[in-house]
Image (cartoon, rainbow, N blue to C red):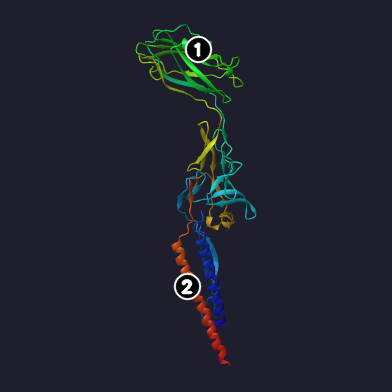
């Protein structure tokens, strides 16, 4: 009977509008959930019945077709925390571990990451972020995996080049013959000196003092001394000469000639360690003015530097738009440690939701395409920021009103059908 059918049709309307309110309520509840993607309930007409002997059809109400995830970009909010990451564009972060009682790889837009006690980059539930790890030289690998960055260290580099810029006083007097047997005699038999700290292959520091002694008009000699405790065969507290040479200048004060020789044999480290002292480019091939000069002004050093460093521990990390994790070390060096990966799907709205704002791959979503951010249509990374929920509260309230009115209208259908059935039963009385 059609009146009974109208009761069932009205009941389906109540159910579908209740489901719509459930989806809307879930959206509103997650309006402030990082990386949340709002849902949309899609409904369809239930199977209809064709009337005998006519072209008309009577519907059997409504039913839920699907709850579709709207994977639209959410607004980004700066946090200032280096390990907070947001995606600008299509794709998901991949995290690996156990969630919702299942182990495997999950996908998320929530980039609230941190370093765990073992140095892995993880989300707040401890699932490990997936990407590409770099070797000790900063070259990234091509196989995805966990990102171990918190225990990185910087190996030492032995000094190879020492650069010096200075002026040697042109009218300085010639001191007594060079005597480098002690620090006192070295200072007494030279005109000026300057110091530089160098490193051996183990990262050990060696303080080197370079003495300059005038030997004639436009002619100087130099001697590089270090404490004997740090060199093979040396005596602690007594200087050991590791390099020496001569300098020549023309009447304009330009450097015209440089010689150098010596051997540096640090204790316990690579022996010998080659050292090159760069005092400038002499004429005629160079300017003669880019290193040591000989002018009438007082002797003074304007720059001294070297290219070695000791070992260093990780001080901080930073992440760029390509997802590259760069570590800064206590010895002043930095290098790429890893790269956060991004996964895209052919049908990303077909991913299955899991606990903790995570998604699982399904047969309908297709296989993930995992690679570097900003490549192959993948999103770029914004560090120090998080992606907010894409829920628009104003739109959700409008949908809530529509669902409420739909529920009320369907209840009227039930009420009217009930009244008509009551009238029909009353005929028999």
Quadrant placement of the N terminus: bottom right
Q: Position of residue 226 (x, y in %)?
A: 53, 17
Disc 2 and disc 1: Cα gap in Å?
99 Å
Front residue of this view, candidates 113 and 105: 113
Picture quadrant where residue 422 is located: bottom right
Q: Can residue 53 be seen in this view?
A: no
Mark drawn on residue 405 = 2
Q: Position of residue 192 (x, y in %)?
A: 44, 14
Q: Circle 1 sits in a helix, a strand or a loop, which is it?
A: helix
Front residue of this view, candidates 128 and 350: 128
- The residue depicted at 59 percent of the width and 37 percent of the height is 151
Q: Circle 2 sits in a helix, a strand or a loop, which is it?
A: helix
- The residue depicted at 58 percent of the width and 16 percent of the height is 236
Query: Considering only vertical position in the picture, is 124 above or below 26?
Result: above
Instruction: Give the farthest residue toward the front.
Output: 184
Q: Is residue 307 left or right of residue 290?
A: right
Q: Can residue 7 be seen in this view?
A: yes
Can you identify the residue that label 1 sits on?
184
Q: Earlier in the sequence, mark 2 or mark 1?
A: 1
Picture quadrant where residue 204 is located: top right
Q: Where is residue 364 in the image (x, y as percent from the top left)?
A: 57, 57
Q: Do the residues labelled 2 and 1 touch (CB within 8 Å)?
A: no
Quadrant placement of the C terminus: bottom right
């Amino acid at each position: 009977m059609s009146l009974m059918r109208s009761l069932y049709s009205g009941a389906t309307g109540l159910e579908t509008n209740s489901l719509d309110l459930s989806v809307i309520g879930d959206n509103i509840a997650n309006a402030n959930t990082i990386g949340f993607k709002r849902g949309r309930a899609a409904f369809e007409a239930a199977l209809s019945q064709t009337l005998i002997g006519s072209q008309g059809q009577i519907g059997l109400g409504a039913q839920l077709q699907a709850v579709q995830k709207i994977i639209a970009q959410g607004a980004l909010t700066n946090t200032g925390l280096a390990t907070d990451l947001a995606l600008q564009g299509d794709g998901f972060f991949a995290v690996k571990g156990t969630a919702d009682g299942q182990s495997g790889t999950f996908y998320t837009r929530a980039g609230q990451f941190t370093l765990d006690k073992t140095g892995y980059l993880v989300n707040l539930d401890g699932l490990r972020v997936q990407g590409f790890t770099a070797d000790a030289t900063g070259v990234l690998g091509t196989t995805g995996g966990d990102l171990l960055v918190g225990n990185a260290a910087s190996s030492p580099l032995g000094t190879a080049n020492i650069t010096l810029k200075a002026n040697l006083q042109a009218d300085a007097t010639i001191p007594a013959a060079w005597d480098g047997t002690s620090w006192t005699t070295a200072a007494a038999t030279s005109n000026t000196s300057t110091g530089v700290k160098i490193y051996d292959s183990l990262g050990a520091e060696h303080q080197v003092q370079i003495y300059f002694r005038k030997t004639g008009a436009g002619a100087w000699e130099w001697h590089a001394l270090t404490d004997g405790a740090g060199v093979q065969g040396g005596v602690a507290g007594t200087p050991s000469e590791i390099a020496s040479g001569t300098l020549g200048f023309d009447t304009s004060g330009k450097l015209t000639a440089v010689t150098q020789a010596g051997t540096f044999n640090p204790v316990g480290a690579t022996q010998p360690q080659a050292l090159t002292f760069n005092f400038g480019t002499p004429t005629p091939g160079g300017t003669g003015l880019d290193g040591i000069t000989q002018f009438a002004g007082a002797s003074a050093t304007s720059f001294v530097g070297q290219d070695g460093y000791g070992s260093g521990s990780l001080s901080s990390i930073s992440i760029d738009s390509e997802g590259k994790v760069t570590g800064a070390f206590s010895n002043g060096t930095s290098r790429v440690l890893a790269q956060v990966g991004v996964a895209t799907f052919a049908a990303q709205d077909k991913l299955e939701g899991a606990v903790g704002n995570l998604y699982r791959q399904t047969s309908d979503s297709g296989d993930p395409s995992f690679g570097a951010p900003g490549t192959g249509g993948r999103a770029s990374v914004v560090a120090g920021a998080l992606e907010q929920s894409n829920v628009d509260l104003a739109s959700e309230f409008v949908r809530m009103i529509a669902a409420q009115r739909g529920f009320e209208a369907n209840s009227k259908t039930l009420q009217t059908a009930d009244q008509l059935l009551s009238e029909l039963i009353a005929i028999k009385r």
